[in-house]
Image: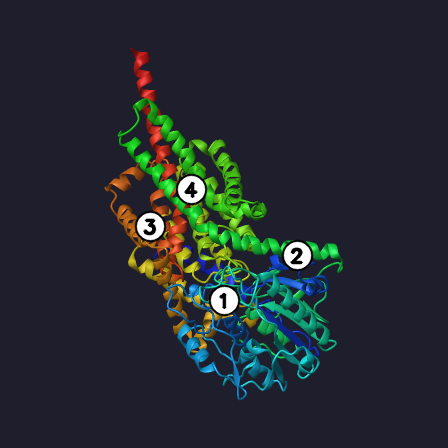
Amino acid sequence: MTRRALAVALALAAALAGFGLGAAGGARAATQAPAGAVVLVGTGGISWSDISEETTPNLWLMLRDGSSAALSTRSVYANTCPDDGWLGLSAGSRAAAPRAGDAPDPADRECPGPPSVVDGAVAEWPSYEQAAAEQRFDTRLGLLAQQVRDGGMCLRAVGPYAAAGAALPDGTVAQYGDYEPADLLVDLNACPVTLVDVGVLRDPDDVPAGEPTPGSRADQLREIDQRIGAVLEAGPNGADFVVASLADAGRSERLRMVLARGPGYGPGTLESPSTRQVGLAQAADLTATVLADVGLPVPDAVQGSPLTSQPAPDNSERRARERLQTLRDLDEASHDVHGLVEPFFQVFAYGQLVVYLLLLLVVKGRIGSEATRTTVLGRVRTLSVAAGAVPVSTFLANLVPWWRFPVEMLAVTAAVLGFVVVIAGLALRGPWRHWVLGPPAVVALVTMVVLAADVMTGSRLQLSSLMGLQPVVGGRFYGMGNPTFALFATAAVILATALSSWLVLRGRRETAFVAVVVVGVVAVVVDGAPFWGADGGGPPALVPAFASLAFAVLGLRLTWRRWLVVGASVVVLFVVVAVLDWLRAPASRSHLGNFVQAVLDGNGGDVVVRKAQQNVELVQQTAPLSYLVPVALLVLALVLARPTSWGSRALARSHEAAPTLRAGLVALLICLTIGFLANDSGVAIPAVGATLAVPLVVSVTIASLLNEQYARAGTRAARRRRR
């Protein structure tokens, strides 16, 4: 191994170790100062669009005088039944009760009714435990009640669903009472921790067929609000009150609401270290909050963090309306975008296929004439550069409140196209436009900078974007999700390829090598740092890709020994960073640290199996297009491996103007393939990466064809002049 090759490995290793060491610091406290009592009031089916001064006066007063956030209730299935929400509160993690029916989609099955308490125990508890074991989420039912009892306190459940949240690991409920207004004063002052079930809202137009509903949506909402008011009035003085909508209203999933009022929660907005988003919490945070509010430690098994309040200037009606509008925006955006992703990108993907098919017919001379060929090629190049600008524009579109418009699809499409015009115009108008890699380099640079800046400043553009993070799914709330990583990694490789080609053309191969290393280090640090991208599967894909490109720039052959050194370095550094992240406080860990904890608990195998199942389910749900992903990776590998193939001959036209293009495509293939294999839902990585890579590579090929056209036209003109 040469010293230069060793320099590549050491430079990337130093970068990874640097951000790994940073993971060991900055832990946040997992508990708050002890308080007298906490009352958690649980309901279901209520979102922020239901809250108003007129229809829900008690919830409105809590919003005005307390702290609030949107709540992701996602549990095991796409939608969350009331039992699921309360069992999740009990475990501090994802849980779900068995559902009746044999519909293929669990969301179409009937939610089970409220549990029953017989002889001081939840009768349905054995079925809950069996379901938890089958779901492989390391669910520890009864954790909340066990922690309260171990802390020398008592926990009282009021109402049937609350019994599921307050049960001990064996299913027994130490203190239980039915919801009776006359008994509230006694029930709410019996224990430091009280869980109250005030009923759930079930939408008559959205529940599965056959499931009964207690009445109209408006009547249910009015009754629940009245019950919440009664609890607030009868509750102990000095207690913290947390009101949470723990479940969905039917088949459709969406963000729900959580409110907190008391000594620990004045007027303001709730925030959670587990989501790293002000105004956005997840269901597991409620378990951590209940424990922290009475001064009890939060176990590592709880997958949430205690909620804290970011204070508002005052509790005026105007401030409350502003907070309500912000929360409604978060709810509406996350709900609306969920149904727009598939149609938007089907049109985007199939539209490109049609354009490229027409381009192929033009290149082969099947349609159009020689006179129109140049015009067609020029327009398709413009279109391909614009298509490459679409992915990053879907993030920038969230700078515009498109969800407030009557036709959301039209509004978000207009916002995306607006940014596409700006980015493509910049790429095609500057002095770099004449170079084949010039416009792709600009699009890649904009993509990389926007995504890096977003994850470094809180991932707000990613939330509820067409290609970003989906809060209703609840998989990730910050950092680099799979689609974001795919775009970021693809942009980084394309940018490094363009920079190295430009420098190699000028005879500065050493500088080109340095440029590749710098871009690679930046990409790995931004993607993998727990305080930014927090992506465990990204660095193992990025490091070999950039090592491959760096070797190629230096003209070094990739021997199996060099690959072995690079691979071993990636594995070792991945383990080191994961362990350093695990050393942080549980509330501050990323997915890396949580996986280490799962391995130590003996549940690492369940995590791997569950993630593999998610990949298989995603492939099945998105078939037949998803089946093309591994086929496309194989075809690309064959094209790049055979320089005489048709595909390589098409790219070879660009080699003189872009000498590292082929090496860059090999690096991109390595990155997307490893990302595909190493991540849950990894099938999305090469598919999303292609939305950026394909149009930009097409633009390079067309630019080369145009240069040939111009050269032939110049030759013919010279000949005519000589005549």
Residue indicated by mark 4: 498
> What kind of residue is marked 1?
Thr
**Amino acid beneath label 2:** Leu
Report which residue position mark 3 lands on.
556
In front: mark 4 or mark 3? Answer: 4
Give the answer, above or below, for where 246 lies relative to 367. below
Helix, strand or loop for disc 2: helix
- Could you tell which of marks 4 and 2 lies nearer the N-terminus? 2
Which mark lies nearer to you, 4 or 2? Answer: 2
Residue bearing mark 2 = 324
Is mark 3 in CB contact (under 8 Å) with mark 2? no
Q: Can you say which quadrant of the picture contains the C terminus?
A: top left
- The quarter of the picture where residue 167 lies is bottom right
Residue occupying the point 43% across, 64% down: 108
- Which badge, 4 or 3, is on the more N-terminal residue? 4
Q: Do the CB atoms of the residues marked 2 and 1 lie less than 8 Å apart?
A: no
In-image side of 366 versus 587 (left or right):
left
Numbered mark located on residue 80 in the image: 1
User: What type is the residue that disc 4 sits on?
Assistant: Ala
Secondary structure beneath label 3:
loop
Quarter of the N terminus within the rendering: bottom left
Total tally of numbered discs in the picture: 4
The disc, 1 or 4, on the residue closer to the chain's N-terminal end is 1
